Image (spheres, rainbow, N blue to C red):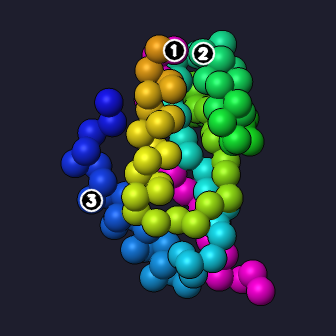
């Protein structure tokens, strides 16, 4: 189960995204990161995430060698919605040795 104390961190991150000029009342493409122990487990998690509507990719960091499964979806980014997604992805990743490891976005401030 995802750490409920992390909800405050999610709220702070969304406040920063909004302060940077994004309109959280409009759709926002968000990338959710899942730390995974290997490419194989990342591909398994990606397959499961695609079943629930995410675009996915699995990539290895060249410097650290660590693997990440990226799960992308366009959403209305409220604290509850983002936190629920993080929790869902954490639960999905756990059987494969992965865990939810944050999120990011390029925002929507330049979109009309």
Residue 79 percent across, percent down from the top left? 40, 62
Residue under label 2, please give it: 41
Say which of 53 and 21 sits in front.
Answer: 53
Q: Residue at x 34, y 67 (%)?
A: 12
Q: Alpha carbon of mark 3 to alpha carbon of mark 1: how far?
A: 27 Å
Q: Is residue 23 left or right of residue 19?
A: right
Q: Alpha carbon of mark 1 to alpha carbon of mark 2: how far?
A: 6 Å
Q: Alpha carbon of mark 3 to alpha carbon of mark 2: how far?
A: 29 Å
Q: Nearer the viewer, mark 3 or mark 2?
A: 3
- Tag 1 or tag 3, which sits nearer the N-term? 3
Asked whether the viewer can see residue 64, the reply is: no
Task: Indicate which disc residue 96 carries.
Answer: 1
Seen in the picture, residue 73 relative to 48 is either above or below; the reply is: below
- Tag 2 or tag 3, which sits nearer the N-term? 3
Q: Is residue 51 magenta?
A: no
Give residue 55's quadrant in the image: top right
Q: Is residue 104 magenta?
A: yes
Residue 56 percent across, percent down from the top left? 71, 37
Describe the element under mark 3 as helix, strand or loop: helix
Q: Which residues are magenta?
A: 96-112
Residue under label 3, please give it: 8
**CB-based contact (under 8 Å), mark 1 and mark 2:** yes
Seen in the picture, residue 65 relative to 105 is either above or below; the reply is: above
Q: Indicate the quadrant containing the N terminus: top left, top right, bottom left or bottom right.
A: top left
Q: Indicate the quadrant containing the C terminus: top left, top right, bottom left or bottom right.
A: bottom right
Residue 27 percent across, percent down from the top left? 66, 70
């Amino acid at each position: 189960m995802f750490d409920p104390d992390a909800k405050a961190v999610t709220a702070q991150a969304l406040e920063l995204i909004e302060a940077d000029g994004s309109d959280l009342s409009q759709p926002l493409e968000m990338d959710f990161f899942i730390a995974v122990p290997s490419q194989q487990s990342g591909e398994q998690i990606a397959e499961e995430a695609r079943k629930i509507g995410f675009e996915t990719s699995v990539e290895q960091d060249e410097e650290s060698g660590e693997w990440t499964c990226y799960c992308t979806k366009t959403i209305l980014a409220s604290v509850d919605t983002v936190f629920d997604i993080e929790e869902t992805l954490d639960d999905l990743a756990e059987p494969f040795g992965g865990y939810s490891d944050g999120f990011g976005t390029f925002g929507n401030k330049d979109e009309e």
